[in-house]
Structure formats: structure tokens, C-alpha cells
């Protein structure tokens, strides 16, 4: 199948792993097609065949011979989303998530590709670790998945991993995410070594001496609650350090889950100065503030970095608008109830986000007119390029990575359970507007909403 | 009122209702037989995950004075040491069908979580550095008895505000009762943004002569190793409240236990203007009032009420 394909454009499948499946032959009939980067914004019959976008035909004029026809009038087709920041918890914490459940959650959220973080147990630090995970992905991943390896051995922050061999084994890049690389000397060596091994280095920016003992953003709310604070400067000082190191070494970095206004400003200035730096923001940081923590609900509102103040949220939105933040990343972090059913300060950091990211942002930012739909669609797929992967697109001839959405559909998060093995969704119980009906990833149907029926052409 | 989880949740009227109730229990306390049958046949669980002398003993005695059956569980020596989660411990104790669970826990929000797991009324006896509502109520009670009202009273809370649940609850309670509160301590121990609660902040004792009440907080020795203050010596030099700094008009309070010679001088503790002993005495009647309010407050037939002829009934007489 894939060997016989002749794609005119590079595909996610070239570098990521997915369970072998059947190429879809679909016609999305009269879909409103929006791909801002490719300049497509009109109604078409989207023909998906042999793993590719075979054609964007005039509405009602596609050849439906032998195809499944999806009645998509009034529905939107976008390039499927790409998430560069997911915790699949495998190996070691399969009770929270694994490759199969995590990629199913991704497919349900409209993603055609994800990158898995390496802070597993043990961390992904050797070529054998990467190979074993890629094998699992080929056996059970619903959407293409790539694996990052740690920057330092055992994430101890002291010695570099064998980064060349890891790259040869297929590591898409490097990250000690979950922990910062506190030693500036080690960080600098990793950036120097990047000139040999390639691969972006994704950074969790936090100075643990400033955030020590903290469980939420440091500000008026933490002052009232008496909960230890994680100050904005614990992030921004490290972003500044690493931007300076990247500039000095002419190396490339990707800053993960920006949360503070000061950090956004530093990334903006670094980009203006020509530093090779990219950045992501998470849906919860774009929608919530630390006011939510007054509820003391760790299931939905405890994560690291923490949700901060309104000015930080606005700065992140501004960053999305002007491209300082090129992509939205969920930092999908599954945890089991026993790790969250404890007082706020004792609870595990992290919330799940894959299944709700688009709907949450559509509801909170697009519908009230804060950002427009084009920008959201563009940023939802912006996480591929920083890791040298092709941006999902609906341009004819491209690998078929398509999400079909009903922008008017209302649904309540969690009412039908989750595809993820964990339920610590930051939107649990909320009614959202906009729902993913179907996801095509690397040419295969990765997800269909159960209640969304498909018609087959006569 | 079903639970007492924070001072923040209480209105001024609710605070006053509890304090009025406490007054009636103070009257009972002056009798030979200090026990009333109000909670006879009902169970109060006291669950302490942190050490405590005053709070735990006064809640226990309050429950006994109200004739409740009392189950006291300390984390040390219980299944908590074997790794049982708070949720499972609460489920276990809930099997006794308690009317109330009084909980102290080292982390914020613990009492609120417990309230979601049990049908019992939950009393927060201190959750991390968050709140200690019964302490605030007994402090307001003590001041109200002394001054009649807190309206316009100027109160300085001095010391380690950052790590103090007493400071948070008292600040909120004093403000609700109309007092003007100033928080005072080294900048390392005053949380950023706390002034948004409507208090003033001072990094020195300059101006403390304007205070009507000085409320000193306990200074914990471990704060030095964390670089919050360079030494107890320097802390005492800057922030110790002594008789030289107090004028005879000013009242002095402290939640206990006191580090003599650190936050307070020995003479200040023993001075006539110190209300520390009154605070401890108030702790019992206010905690009786809290249990009463939660467990019998909504029931007009409960055998304790204010007013002539319906005074709290001593046990042994008709209930």
C-alpha cells in the first residue's frame, strides 16, 4: 500500500509510525473547506483516495463511484491538527495512557499526528527505547505518532544521551519535558551537539529554585489560598537564558507550554533578533486564569506550568495572533483518579486535552470573536514544522489529513466518557460548541463520532 | 449551615450567630455540671493529620460537653501511616455514620474535599496554609467580649503571614466585622498580592502605636534554613512585640503556641493586656457553638436555645 504510493509532497508517514490500515476512499460532499495556509476557503467535494487528497471538486460534481459519501453540507473540513506535546505514559504508566488509547484520544480530537514526550518510566533515553515504542505505534497507533528522546540520561540533567544514535533510531527530537535542564552548561553542550545530531530541542522552562514547593501561579489568588506559588519569573528567566544560549550557539529550540506574559515577550524579541526559536501554548493557558484555582479542584486546574493571570492569557493570545506562538499544543497529561482525588497541593500536575482542544478554543476564543477561525485552524496544525515535519494541508495531492467538524454542535465533555484512559480533562462537564465528527490521518479513517452516520453512494 | 470550611464562606450575620451561641455556652461553662445533652446519640469524628494541642483538645471537649460520642483519630498511629488515602480514611470513618467530621490536614482544600465525600457536616480545623476558621471565630469572639464591637478597630497582624492559615482567616474575619487590618512582617514572609484582600501591608513595626490590637503570629524555626529570615535574632530585633513597643491601651493576641523571646517578649505574654488565656478559653465555647450550629442549628426543638426559660439544659435534668 504505502510502498506503491507516489506522493508529490512529503508525508507524516515518512517519519512517524501508525498502525497499518486501509486507505480511505471518501467523498466529503459539499464540505466547507478551509485551509488558511494553502489559501483554500470555499465549498467543495473533498475526494480522498489512495491516501491522498485526490481532488477538491466543485460541489456536487465529484466522482463518487466506489466511494463512501459523507454528507458534509454545512460542515467544515480543515487540515487535521498536529500536537507536538503529548504524554502517552508508555512505558511505565500504562494505567494512565498507552499508545493505543492516547492516539485514539488524538484522533477523536481531530489530530492527524502527535509527538510523545520522553518522561516515561524509565525515560526514553536509548535507541532501544525508541525502537520499542515505534514498534508499539506500528501495532496500535490510530494516528501517526513520533517519539522524542530525552536530552539527558535518565532526565537527570547532567550527561547527554547518545543523541546521534537516538536520531538514527528515529527520535523526532529531544526533550526532558516534565523537568527543566537547570545546568546552563549542559544546555549549552546539547545545543552545540545539535549541529551534529540535528533534531529540535523542546524545553520545559522552569527554575526549580524559584518554583520550589509551588502548586499554582504566584499572585493574589495563591496569597489568599495559602498555596505555594510558581512565579512567572521561574519560567521567563529560563526562556531568556535559553534564547541567549540558542543565539550564541546558532542552535534551534522549541519552547514548550508558554504560560507567562514575560516569556511571550522574550520569545518575540528573540525571533525579531533572528534566533531559531519556536513556541507553543496550551488550550488551558489560552482559556483559563488562576481564578479557577479558587475552586481548589486539582482534577481540572492543577498543571505545570500553572494557569496564570488575565494579562498572561491575553499575552498568549497576542502571541498566537502575531505568530510569536506558532502552534497550539495540548500538553495532554493523563492521570488516574487516585492521583487527583487528594488535596490540591498533593495532586499530580497535568490535565488531558487532546479530545477537547479544538472545541474548547472554538468556544472560548472564536465564537466570542477574540480570534478568527482561520487563525485557530492555522495554529492547531502549526506544531509539525518546528520538528521538520510537513504541515497538514488540504492542497490536492497532499497526504490526506483531514478533520471534519460541525461548528454548531453542542456537546458536554465527558458525558460519553473519554477515548483517553484518564478523565482529568480541564473541560470536564463543560458544554462546548463545535465537535469533531471524523478524522482522516495519513489517508486512513482514524475516528468517526458514533452518532455520525455515513452514506454509501448508490 | 452544613459545613464550616472557611471564613470566606461566612457572612457577618452568620459569624455573629455563632458568637451569640458561644455566649450562651459560656453561661453553661460557669455551672457545676458543664454538660448539655444536645448531641446525645450522635457521633463526632475528629481527624487530625497534624499535631495540635489547643484545637484538637478543645474540639474534643466541645463534642463531649454536647454529649456526642467522640472518635479521635490522629494520623500518627493510624492507617494513614500505612498509606491509606484521605478519601479511603474518610470512607472508613463514614461507616460510623458520624454527624460531623472535624479535620485538620497539612494541605489546602482538604476539608472541602472531605465534604464532597461524606454526608456528615465537615469542620475545617486547619487546612494547610489556607484557613483556620474556628481560630478566627474564637479570636473575634474574644475581641468582641473585650471591645463590644470590631467596627473601626485597628488590628495589626505581625509575623510570618506567608505560612499562616491563622493570618488568612483572621484577616478575612476581622475585615468582615468592620476592623481595619494591617499585615506586618519581613517582605519575604508577606505573600505578594495579599493587599488585594483589602488590608494594608507594612514591612516594619513603625506605626504600630496606632493599633488597637496587636496579633502576633508564631515564627517557626525552620524558616531560617529556607532563607526567609537571616536569623531569629534579627527577626526578633525587627519584629518582636515587647512591652516597650506596646502602650497600655493596646491589646495583645497570639494563636499559640508562643515562642517566648522570639515573636513576643516574655513580659508581653504575661502582661495584663495579653488576651492569650482568654483566647484559649474562648476556643471551647466557640467550638461548642460551631458544632451546635452545624448539627442542631436548623432544629428549633434542639434542647439548647437562648432566651429565658430555654437556657442550655444541664444533663440530668429534663432534655
Image (spheres, coloured by chain):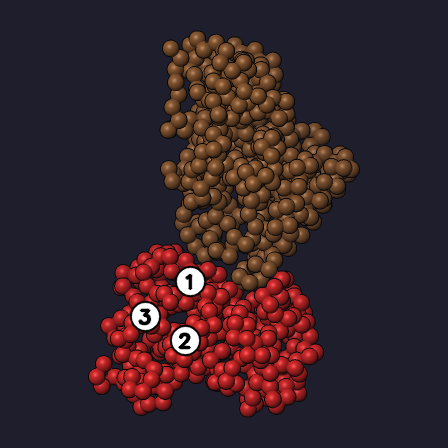
Chain colours: A brown, B red
Q: Chain of mark 1?
A: B
Which residue is at the front of the view, A242 or B152? B152
Of residues A297 and A318, which is closer to you in this image?
A: A318
Q: Is residue B39 left or right of residue A230?
A: left
Q: CA distance from mark 2 to mark 1?
A: 20 Å
The dot on residue B298 is 3
Residue for badge 2: B18
Say whether disc 2 or disc 3 marks the residue closer to the N-terminus: 2
Instruction: Find residue B202 and report its horizontal and vertical position in percent.
Output: 67, 72
Task: Tell me which chain the residue with mark 3 is part of.
Answer: B
- Along the polypeptide, which appears first: circle 2 or circle 1? 2
Q: Position of residue B104 (x, y in %)?
A: 43, 67
Chain for numbered disc 2: B
Is residue A196 visible in the rendered image? The answer is yes
For the C terminus of chain A, the image quarter is top left
Q: CA distance from mark 1 to mark 3?
A: 22 Å
Question: Residue drawn at (63%, 62%), measured in percent from left and top?
Answer: B192
Relative to B128, B225 lies left or right:
right
Q: Is residue A180 visible?
A: no
Task: Judge if badges 2 and 3 mark residues of a common chain.
Answer: yes
- Asked if the residue under mark 3 is in contact with the one under mark 2, i.e. CB atoms within 8 Å, the reply is no
Mark 1 touching mark 3, by CB under 8 A? Answer: no
- Residue, x 61% and y 58% (percent of image)? A219
- Depth check, front residue: B132 or A30: A30
| Figure check: B123 above or below B28 | above
Mark 1 lies on residue? B111
Amino acid at each position: 500500500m504505502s510502498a506503491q504510493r507516489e506522493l508529490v509532497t512529503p508525508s507524516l508517514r515518512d517519519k512517524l509510525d501508525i498502525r497499518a490500515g486501509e486507505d480511505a476512499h471518501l467523498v466529503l460532499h459539499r464540505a466547507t473547506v478551509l485551509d488558511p495556509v494553502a489559501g483554500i476557503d470555499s465549498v467543495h467535494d473533498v475526494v480522498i483516495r489512495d491516501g491522498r487528497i485526490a481532488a477538491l471538486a466543485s460541489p456536487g460534481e465529484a466522482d463518487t463511484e466506489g466511494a463512501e459519501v459523507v454528507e458534509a453540507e454545512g460542515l467544515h473540513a480543515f487540515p487535521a491538527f498536529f500536537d507536538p506535546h503529548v504524554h502517552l505514559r508508555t512505558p511505565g504508566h500504562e494505567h494512565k495512557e498507552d499508545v493505543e488509547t492516547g492516539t485514539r484520544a488524538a484522533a477523536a480530537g481531530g489530530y492527524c499526528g502527535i509527538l510523545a514526550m520522553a518522561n516515561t518510566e524509565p525515560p526514553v533515553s536509548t535507541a532501544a527505547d525508541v525502537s520499542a515504542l515505534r514498534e508499539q505505534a506500528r501495532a496500535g497507533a490510530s494516528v501517526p505518532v513520533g517519539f522524542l528522546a530525552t536530552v539527558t540520561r535518565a532526565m537527570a540533567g547532567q550527561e547527554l544521551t547518545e543523541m546521534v544514535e537516538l536520531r538514527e533510531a528515529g527520535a523526532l527530537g529531544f526533550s526532558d519535558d516534565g523537568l527543566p535542564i537547570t545546568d546552563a552548561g549542559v544546555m549549552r553542550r546539547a545545543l552545540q551537539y545539535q549541529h551534529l545530531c540535528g533534531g529540535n530541542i523542546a524545553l520545559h522552562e522552569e527554575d526549580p529554585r524559584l518554583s520550589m514547593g509551588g502548586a499554582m501561579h504566584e499572585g493574589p489568588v495563591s496569597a489568599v489560598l495559602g498555596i505555594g506559588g510558581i512565579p512567572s519569573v521561574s519560567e521567563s528567566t529560563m526562556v531568556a537564558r535559553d534564547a541567549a544560549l540558542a543565539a550564541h550557539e546558532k542552535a534551534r529550540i522549541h519552547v514548550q507550554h508558554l504560560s507567562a506574559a514575560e516569556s511571550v515577550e522574550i520569545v518575540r524579541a528573540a525571533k525579531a533578533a533572528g534566533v531559531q526559536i519556536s513556541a507553543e501554548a496550551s488550550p488551558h493557558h489560552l482559556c483559563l486564569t488562576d481564578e479557577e484555582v479558587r475552586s481548589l479542584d486539582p482534577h481540572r486546574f492543577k498543571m505545570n506550568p500553572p494557569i496564570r493571570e488575565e494579562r498572561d492569557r491575553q499575552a498568549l493570545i497576542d502571541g498566537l495572533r502575531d505568530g510569536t506562538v506558532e502552534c497550539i499544543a495540548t500538553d495532554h497529561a493523563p492521570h488516574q483518579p487516585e492521583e487527583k482525588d487528594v488535596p490540591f497541593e498533593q495532586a499530580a500536575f497535568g490535565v488531558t486535552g487532546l479530545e477537547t482542544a479544538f472545541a474548547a478554543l472554538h468556544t472560548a476564543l472564536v465564537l466570542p470573536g477574540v480570534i478568527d477561525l482561520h487563525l485557530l485552524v492555522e495554529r492547531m496544525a502549526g506544531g509539525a514544522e518546528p520538528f521538520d515535519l510537513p504541515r497538514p494541508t488540504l492542497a490536492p495531492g497532499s497526504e490526506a489529513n483531514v478533520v471534519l467538524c460541525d461548528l454548531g454542535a453542542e456537546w458536554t465533555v465527558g458525558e460519553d466518557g473519554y477515548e483517553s484512559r484518564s478523565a482529568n480533562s480541564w473541560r470536564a462537564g463543560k458544554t462546548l460548541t463545535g465537535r469533531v465528527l471524523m478524522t482522516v490521518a495519513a489517508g486512513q479513517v482514524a475516528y468517526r463520532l458514533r452518532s455520525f452516520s455515513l452514506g454509501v453512494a448508490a | 449551615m452544613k459545613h464550616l470550611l472557611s471564613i470566606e464562606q461566612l457572612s457577618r450575620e452568620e459569624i455573629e450567630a455563632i458568637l451569640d451561641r458561644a455566649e450562651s455556652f459560656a453561661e453553661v461553662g460557669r455551672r457545676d455540671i458543664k454538660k448539655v445533652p444536645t448531641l446525645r446519640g450522635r457521633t463526632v469524628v475528629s481527624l487530625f493529620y497534624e499535631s495540635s494541642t489547643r484545637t484538637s483538645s478543645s474540639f474534643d471537649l466541645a463534642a463531649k460537653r454536647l454529649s456526642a460520642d467522640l472518635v479521635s483519630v490522629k494520623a500518627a498511629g493510624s492507617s494513614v501511616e500505612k498509606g491509606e488515602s484521605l478519601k479511603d480514611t474518610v470512607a472508613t470513618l463514614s461507616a460510623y455514620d458520624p454527624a460531623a467530621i472535624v479535620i485538620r490536614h497539612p494541605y489546602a482544600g482538604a476539608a472541602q474535599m472531605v465534604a464532597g465525600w461524606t454526608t456528615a457536616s465537615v469542620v475545617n480545623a486547619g487546612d494547610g496554609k489556607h484557613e483556620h476558621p474556628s481560630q478566627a471565630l474564637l479570636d473575634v469572639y474574644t475581641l468582641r467580649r473585650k471591645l463590644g464591637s470590631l467596627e473601626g478597630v485597628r488590628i495589626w497582624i505581625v509575623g510570618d503571614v506567608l505560612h499562616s492559615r491563622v493570618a488568612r482567616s483572621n484577616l478575612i474575619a476581622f475585615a468582615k466585622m468592620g476592623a481595619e487590618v494591617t499585615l506586618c512582617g519581613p517582605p519575604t514572609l508577606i505573600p505578594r498580592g495579599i493587599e488585594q484582600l483589602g488590608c494594608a501591608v507594612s514591612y516594619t513595626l513603625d506605626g504600630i502605636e496606632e493599633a488597637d490590637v496587636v496579633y502576633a503570629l508564631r515564627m517557626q524555626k525552620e524558616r531560617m534554613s529556607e532563607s526567609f529570615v537571616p536569623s531569629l535574632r534579627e527577626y526578633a530585633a525587627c519584629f518582636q512585640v515587647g512591652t516597650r513597643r506596646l502602650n497600655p491601651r493596646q491589646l495583645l493576641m497570639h494563636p499559640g503556641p508562643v515562642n517566648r523571646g522570639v515573636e513576643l517578649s516574655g513580659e508581653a505574654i504575661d502582661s495584663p493586656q495579653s488576651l492569650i488565656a482568654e483566647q484559649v478559653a474562648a476556643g471551647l465555647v466557640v467550638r461548642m457553638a460551631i458544632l451546635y450550629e452545624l448539627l442542631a442549628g436548623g432544629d428549633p426543638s434542639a434542647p439548647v436555645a437562648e432566651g429565658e426559660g430555654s437556657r442550655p439544659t444541664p444533663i440530668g435534668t429534663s432534655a
